C-alpha cells in the first residue's frame, strides 16, 4: 500500500518533468510557475490519497491500525492544504512577475478572464476551511455532526480542483496519456468511496435487516444497545472491531457514529455500549426497540489476530473498556493468560464489573481497578512504568492492548517505551473513535 502511494507520487514527478519543465526555468517567474504546477499535482494527489483512506476499504483497514490511518489522514490533510495554497500563491506571483502586474491585478485577471480559475479559488478556500476546523483546538469546539459535515466538503473541493486541472492544467491539455492516468486516479478513488460508503452499507441493510432489540442501563450515563437481525453469523466481524452506526429514527437518521462492539460476535445479537458525551449519545437513550439500524464496517485491526504472545496485558480507560471486554471474551481460557488494568475516575464510571470479573477469572487472570482522580505528582502516575511492571512482571513477554482517552494512551505508550516493550506487541485503539 505504501509502495503504491509512493510509486504514484514518483510517476507524477516524472510526468511533470516529462513535459519539458527544466529547460524553461530561466528566470524567477518561470521557476515560480513551474513549482506552482508541481505543488498543484502533488496537492491534489495527496487529497486523493486521503479519499482512499476515508473510503473505509477493507483492503486498507485490514492492513493498518485505525490510529495509524487517522495519523496519516491528518498529516496528509495539512500537506494537501499547504501544497494547494502554495500552488495559488506561486502561480499568481509567477504570472504577476512575468507580466509586470501586482498580485491583486493578476488575481483579478485570473478571475475575470479564465472561467475555470474561479473553481480553483473556491476549491482552495474549501481546503483551507477544512484544515482550520481540523485543528485540535477548533475540533473540540465542534460537534461530531458539524465536523463530519464540514469534512464532506472535501469531495466538492476535489471535484472543483479536478475540473480546473482538466480545463487549465498545462500537464493535461496536450498529453492524452497524462490525462488518462490522472482521470484513472480519480476514478479509482471515486469507485472505492461509492463501493464501501454507499453500496456496501445498503447491501448489508438489505441482507441483515438490523433493528434495536433492547436498551439496558449500565450506569447513570451509560447504556448498552442490543441489536438483532437476520444471519448475523455471516457478518465478517471480530471482537475489538467497530462499526459506523446509523439509527433510522427522527433526528438521528442523517448522523453516522463509530462504536466498538462491547460483546464478542455471537451470531445472535450485536452489542454496543455508549457513554453520554454529547447531544447524539444523549439522544440514544430515547431509542425504542424496533428502530432500524444501518451499519458501515466492520473496521479496525484491534483484534486477537494481532496477538504474538500467549499472554496479554489489557489497559482500559473509562468507556474505552468496551472493545477490551469483547476481546477478553474471545481469548482462550488459559491460566494467567490475561491481566486487565481498568482506569476510571470513580466507581460509578466502572462498567461491566461483574462481567469482567467473571470473564477474566475464567481465564485464570486478574483485574486491577485503578479508581480515583489522577494526581499531578511526578512519578506516581498509576500507569507509570513501575506500576505496570508490578502488575505484570513478565510484561515484555506479553501483547499489550490499550484503549482509552488520548492522554491516558500517551502516558501508557511512554511507560512501555521506558520498559522497552517491543512495538510489535503493542496494539492501540484511541477513545476518540468510540464517542
Image (cartoon, rainbow, N blue to C red):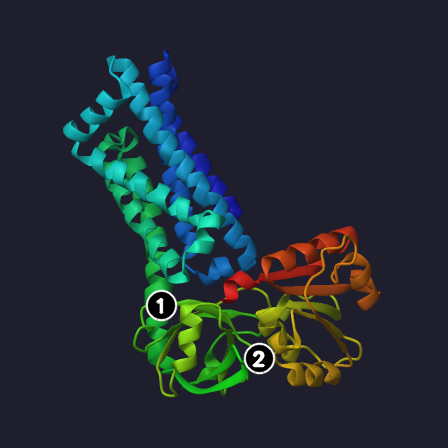
**Which residue corresponds to the image point at 40% horizontal and 70% vertical from the top-left?**
280
Residue 177, quarter of picture = top left
The x, y position of residue 396, in whole percent, is 79, 60
Q: Is residue 434 left or right of residue 38?
A: right
Q: Which residue is mark 1?
A: 255
The x, y position of residue 287, in whole percent, is 39, 82
Position above or below: 110 against 148: above
**Which residue corresponds to the image point at 74% horizontal and 61% vertical from the top-left?**
383
**Secondary structure state at the residue bearing disc 2:** loop
Q: Within 10 angstroms of label 1, few (less than 14), some, or many (20 or more) residues?
A: some
Q: Which residue is mark 2?
A: 264
**Which residue corresponds to the image point at 62% horizontal and 61% vertical from the top-left?**
428
Quick one: 271 or 345, which is closer to the camera? 345
Quick one: 300 or 120, which is closer to the camera? 120
Quick one: 311 or 171, which is closer to the camera? 311
Mark yes or no: residue 64 visible.
no
Whichever of callouts 1 and 2 sits on the residue coming sooner in the sequence is 1
The x, y position of residue 25, in whole percent, is 37, 15
Q: Is residue 267 left or right of residue 313?
A: left
Position above or below: 251 against 388: below
Position above or below: 28 against 385: above
Quick one: 407 or 55, which is closer to the camera? 407
**Which of labels 1 and 2 is toward the front?**
1
Mark yes or no: residue 332 visible.
yes
Amino acid at each position: 500500500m505504501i509502495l503504491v502511494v509512493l510509486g504514484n507520487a514518483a510517476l507524477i514527478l516524472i510526468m511533470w518533468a516529462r513535459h519539458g519543465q527544466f529547460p524553461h526555468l530561466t528566470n524567477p517567474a518561470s521557476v515560480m510557475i513551474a513549482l506552482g504546477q508541481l505543488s498543484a499535482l502533488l496537492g491534489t494527489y495527496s487529497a486523493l490519497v486521503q479519499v482512499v483512506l476515508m473510503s473505509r476499504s477493507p483492503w486498507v483497514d485490514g492492513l493498518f491500525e485505525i490510529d495509524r490511518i487517522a495519523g496519516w489522514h491528518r498529516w496528509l490533510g495539512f500537506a494537501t492544504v499547504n501544497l494547494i495554497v502554495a500552488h495559488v500563491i506561486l502561480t499568481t506571483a509567477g504570472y504577476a512577475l512575468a507580466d509586470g502586474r501586482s498580485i491583486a491585478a493578476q488575481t483579478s485577471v485570473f478571475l475575470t478572464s479564465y472561467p475555470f480559475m474561479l473553481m480553483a479559488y473556491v476549491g482552495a478556500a474549501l481546503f483551507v476551511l477544512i484544515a482550520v476546523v481540523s485543528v485540535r483546538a477548533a475540533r473540540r469546539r465542534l460537534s461530531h455532526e458539524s465536523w463530519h459535515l464540514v469534512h464532506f466538503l472535501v469531495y466538492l473541493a476535489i471535484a472543483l480542483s479536478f475540473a480546473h486541472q482538466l480545463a487549465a492544467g498545462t500537464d493535461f491539455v496536450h498529453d492524452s496519456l497524462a490525462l488518462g492516468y490522472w482521470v484513472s486516479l480519480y476514478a479509482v478513488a471515486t469507485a472505492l468511496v461509492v463501493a464501501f460508503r454507499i453500496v456496501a452499507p445498503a447491501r448489508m441493510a438489505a441482507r441483515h435487516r438490523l433493528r434495536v432489540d433492547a436498551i439496558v442501563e449500565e450506569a447513570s450515563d451509560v447504556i448498552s444497545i442490543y441489536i438483532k437481525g437476520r444471519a448475523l453469523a455471516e457478518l465478517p466481524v471480530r471482537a475489538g472491531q467497530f462499526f459506523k452506526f446509523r439509527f433510522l429514527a427522527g433526528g438521528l437518521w442523517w448522523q453516522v457514529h463509530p462504536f466498538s462492539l462491547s460483546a464478542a460476535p455471537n451470531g445472535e445479537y450485536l452489542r454496543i455500549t455508549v457513554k453520554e458525551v454529547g447531544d447524539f449519545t444523549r439522544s440514544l437513550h430515547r431509542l425504542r426497540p424496533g428502530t432500524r439500524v444501518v451499519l458501515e464496517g466492520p473496521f479496525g485491526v484491534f483484534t486477537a489476530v494481532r496477538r504474538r504472545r500467549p499472554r496479554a496485558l489489557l489497559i482500559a480507560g473509562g468507556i474505552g473498556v468496551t472493545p477490551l471486554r469483547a476481546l477478553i471474551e474471545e481469548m482462550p481460557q488459559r491460566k494467567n493468560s490475561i491481566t486487565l488494568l481498568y482506569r476510571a475516575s470513580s466507581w460509578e464510571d466502572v462498567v461491566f464489573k461483574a462481567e469482567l470479573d467473571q470473564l477474566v477469572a475464567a481465564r485464570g487472570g486478574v483485574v486491577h481497578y485503578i479508581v480515583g482522580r489522577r494526581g499531578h505528582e511526578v512519578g506516581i502516575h498509576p500507569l507509570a512504568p513501575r506500576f505496570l511492571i508490578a502488575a505484570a512482571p513478565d510484561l515484555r513477554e506479553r501483547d499489550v492492548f490499550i484503549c482509552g482517552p488520548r492522554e491516558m494512551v500517551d502516558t501508557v505508550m511512554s511507560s512501555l517505551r521506558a520498559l522497552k516493550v517491543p512495538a510489535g506487541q503493542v496494539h492501540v485503539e484511541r477513545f476518540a473513535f468510540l464517542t
